[in-house]
Image: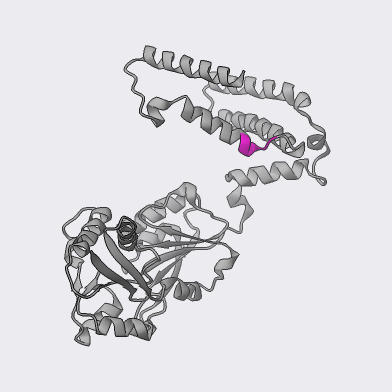
């Protein structure tokens, strides 16, 4: 079984590297680097420390997933009498997929993996952009980030912004939640002599020519309340305030019974907007229907019976349960089969309720 010791090269120069890591690298008889495109790696080479990098593997595969799997496969095939040393940028446990794959192999008994340590780029990045992560910080991978997962009221750090293509993906993802001119910060090689910190509007993010494996993007928390108006939690907070002690007298006195007529009226107006093919009107009237849902949910929460979370959970569960041909392994070949499936599921639900 291959014995692999994983160390981190740190965020930049050798000066940042802990002494015990440097000694480990210098004395290694079998040293592998995920990439030599790193300041510390270049300095190690200048000192005559021999290593094998996986830079050539990146050229053979179209995706990072395939590349990382190939790197791990090569390491697993090594037959060294002493533990092999595998060095990665930063800290092994921060934004390093190959290490996660190695740990999975360790868990399955296919390798013995020992994480030695290293210095993460995050410490230097926090200093570079002058933030305290305890205020709320989300760290996301540029390759997998989606707009829905972003917590825009917290500090956001997007890591592994390797090149302009990746920066373009990050830009478009952020634009799903933020205005085009929102100011973000590009940080290159945080903590090293070549550290570069630059503020720029979001729409210019992919125009920076110095993107590399040491590049991260910092997105400051949203402070302008108007930018939160399309956030569900903001709507929830507004309804809670309206129903709260210092809220609106009309909203505070409403009950499920008193709101019934408004739900009917708003639904009729939605139908009118659809019949009139008036999109702007439809958006407004759907909002009014949503308002009714939120008011009923807040009343339920105020009375201790249910919350809007229960409403959402119930709907999500129902949609997944009633669509096993989409979310499960059920096969349907025709609309008739789909109708039969639907009726069968509804009968099962009724039986469970009764």
| Placement of 263 over or under 67, stated as above or below | above
Q: Is residue 321 left or right of residue 114?
A: right
| Placement of 307 over or under 329, stated as above or below | below
Measured as percent of width and height from the top left, residue 331 is found at: 33, 22
| Placement of 33 over or under 340, stated as above or below | below
Question: Viewer-proximal residue, 235 or 338?
Answer: 338
Measured as percent of width and height from the top left, residue 199 is found at: 46, 68
Question: Viewer-proximal residue, 250 or 31?
Answer: 31
Task: Determine the residue positioned at 33% across, 63% down.
Answer: 99
Task: Determine the residue positioned at 18% across, 80% down.
Answer: 50
Task: Determine the residue positioned at 34% across, 15% down.
Answer: 334
Q: Is residue 186 magenta?
A: no
Question: Viewer-proximal residue, 21 or 122?
Answer: 21
| Placement of 144 over or under 7, stated as above or below | above
For residue 293, what is the image quadrant? Answer: top right
Magenta region, residue range: 306-310
For residue 86, what is the image quadrant? Answer: bottom left
Question: Viewer-proximal residue, 328 or 250?
Answer: 328
The answer, for residue 211, to whether it is visible in the render is no
Q: Is residue 312 left or right of residue 91?
A: right
């Amino acid at each position: 079984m291959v014995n692999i010791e994983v160390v981190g090269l740190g965020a930049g120069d050798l000066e940042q590297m802990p002494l015990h890591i440097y000694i480990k690298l210098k004395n290694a008889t079998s040293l592998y680097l995920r990439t030599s495109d790193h300041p510390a790696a270049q300095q190690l080479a200048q000192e005559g420390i021999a290593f094998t990098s996986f830079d050539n593997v990146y050229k053979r595969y179209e995706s990072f997933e395939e590349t990382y799997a190939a790197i791990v496969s090569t390491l697993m095939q090594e037959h060294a009498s002493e533990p092999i040393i595998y060095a990665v940028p930063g800290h092994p446990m921060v934004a390093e997929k190959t290490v996660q794959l190695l740990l999975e192999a360790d868990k399955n008994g296919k390798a013995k993996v020992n994480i030695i340590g290293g210095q993460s780029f995050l410490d230097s990045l926090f200093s570079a952009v002058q933030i305290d992560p305890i205020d709320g910080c989300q760290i996301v991978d540029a390759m997998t980030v989606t707009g829905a997962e972003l917590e825009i009221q917290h500090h956001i750090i997007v890591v592994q912004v390797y090149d302009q293509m990746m920066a373009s993906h990050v830009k478009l993802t952020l634009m799903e939640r933020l205005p085009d001119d929102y100011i973000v910060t590009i940080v290159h090689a945080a903590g090293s002599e070549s550290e570069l910190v630059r503020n720029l509007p979001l729409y210019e993010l992919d125009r920076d020519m110095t993107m590399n494996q040491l590049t991260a993007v910092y997105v400051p928390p949203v402070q302008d309340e108007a930018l939160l108006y399309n956030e569900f939690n903001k709507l929830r907070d507004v309804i809670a305030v309206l129903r709260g002690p210092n809220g609106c007298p009309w909203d505070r006195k409403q009950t499920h019974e008193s709101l019934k007529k408004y739900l009917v009226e708003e639904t009729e107006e939605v139908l009118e907007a659809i019949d009139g093919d008036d999109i702007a009107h439809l958006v407004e009237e759907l909002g009014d229907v949503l308002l009714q849902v939120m008011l009923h949910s807040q009343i339920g929460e105020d009375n201790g019976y249910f919350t809007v979370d229960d409403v959402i959970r119930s709907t999500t569960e129902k949609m997944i349960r009633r669509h096993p041909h989409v979310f499960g392994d059920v096969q349907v070949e025709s609309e008739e089969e789909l109708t039969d499936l639907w009726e069968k599921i509804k009968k099962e639900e009724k039986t469970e309720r009764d």
